[in-house]
Image (cartoon, rainbow, N blue to C red):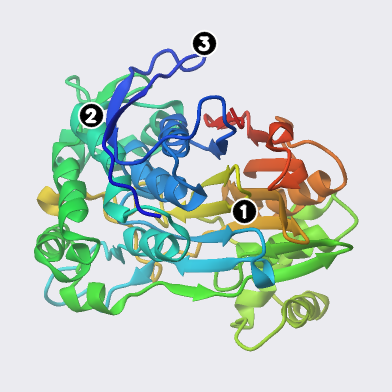
Amino acid sequence: MRHAVSAVLAISVTGCSLNKYSPVKIVSHMFGPSPGALIGTVSADEPQATLVGRDILQRGGNAADAATAMGMALSVTLPSRASLGAGGACLAYRPGDQNGGRAFMFLPVAGTVAATGMPRADRPAAVPMMARGLYLMHLQYGSVAFSELLPGAITLASNGINVSRQLAGDLAAVQVPLLADAGIRAIFSRSDGKALAEGDALVQTHLSGALDQIRSMGVGDLYNGALAQSFVAGSQAAGGGLQVADLRAAVPSEQKPLVVENGETRVAFLPPPADGGLGSAVTFRSAASSDAATRAQAAIAAWRAQNGNATGGTADSVLARAQAFVNAGGGAGGGLPALPASTSFTVVDHAGMAVACSLSMDNLFGTGRMAGNTGIVLGASPARLPQPLYTAAIASQGRAFRAVAAGSGQNDAAAAVGVTMRNILAGQAPDAHPVTAQGRVNAISCPRGLPGDGATCVAATDPRGAGLAMGPR
């Protein structure tokens, strides 16, 4: 059902760990649930994105609505890992879905321009896939118009945000090369020339304009309209080398997930080419946790070395092929090179719909340059860097939702999700205890299932990050 009532929504950030953030006003166009109703559970690596998703649920949106709004908000609050120039993958599930739900694949795509020639492409950029991917997921699972989910991100960009600990850490990690670019420096540096620090104000006026154009003209404008022309011109001026034909040709896909049966429980994982899901499934099926990261990385490395893909294969056949590669000594020495950073989030609504997404720029801040006056940070071309691990999992029992997890954290992301999901289904609540050295997990568990007793749902985010998890009320 699509709603048409307008309301003003206040995001009040409370709690001692979050009181540095200022309240933000956003506009919603949805009815709210009845007072005291269970609304859902949200977890993300970045607090302000969690609050945007939570408010969408409070105004009657479902999990797909909230996830879409969170992804777009992350393009403002965590552009180091989730700009509109990013890509990624999502799992979505509604109670009763066959095959464990659906996987939506919008991994970064390389442009067609070489590093030499015209236009100049000294830092090849990825085709921006996130908006299109979230739109496809929302088209299949959402309950309100896509345009009604953008005001939160638009307001965060135009009114400004306080830099989170996660974004401040990313800026500090790459500030010397990053601030060498004038366009980036104008947005992400202080008056003393240093990178913005935690709590500093970040206003992104041009990005607000781009988001508003998507809201008014539709997602297609970024791929085949006036915004596409501006983005391509900005990309070429910044050495990204993208062309309008690249944007038109790159489309997301909807696929069946990898599904592992575990007694009465069905666990769906992101399928290749989001091969972090493959690593998570291998880890989930293993009885041991001590070598989880090594096992997951070996399976993924072997799969990549054999140019594996999931076309036409069942989950068992895909996993068997991956394990056979490992047993045969396949893969890059049994491991993976250093992989790019990513971010993740999860959301579950009161009816048991769940969405888990993993996003990346293929490098912190992608190419380190901005697409002209669009305010969009350009993602890095996957032709230049290894693919990050996009990983997520959703568990269901019969027609009921049971648990969801999504991971980030470079090379350990896949193992972290696999171990976390196994622990949850063994009766453990998702908590603040890390399960791998680098892996970061956002997870939600509803031990009595949904629809059902949502009051028992528990959410968690890794304490080593800077995220926020919020429960069902």
Residue at the front extreme? Answer: 34
Residue 180, quarter of picture: top left
Residue 302: image location, x then y, percent: 69, 74
Distance from disc 3 to disc 2, alpha carbons, whole Å, reads 26 Å
Residue 173, quarter of picture: top left
| Residue bearing mark 2 | 189
Image position of 473 with respect to 368: above or below = above
| Residue bearing mark 3 | 16
Q: Earlier in the sequence, mark 1 or mark 3?
A: 3
Quarter of the rendering occupied by the N terminus:
bottom left
Distance from disc 2 to disc 1, alpha carbons, whole Å, reads 30 Å
Q: Amino acid at mark 2?
A: Ser
Q: Earlier in the sequence, mark 2 or mark 1?
A: 2
Check contact, mark 1 vs mark 3: CB within 8 A.
no
Distance from disc 1 to disc 3, alpha carbons, whole Å, reads 32 Å
Q: Earlier in the sequence, mark 3 or mark 2?
A: 3
Q: Amino acid at mark 1?
A: Asn
* Mark 3 Cα-neighbour bin, 10 Å: few <14, some 14–19, many ≥20: few
Image position of 145 with respect to 188: above or below = below
Check contact, mark 3 vs mark 2: CB within 8 A.
no
Image position of 444 with respect to 470: above or below = below
Residue 174: image location, x then y, percent: 37, 39
- Name the element at disc 1: helix
**Image depth: mark 3 or mark 2 in front:** 3
| Residue bearing mark 1 | 411
Q: Amino acid at mark 3?
A: Cys
- Name the element at disc 2: loop
* Mark 2 Cα-neighbour bin, 10 Å: few <14, some 14–19, many ≥20: some
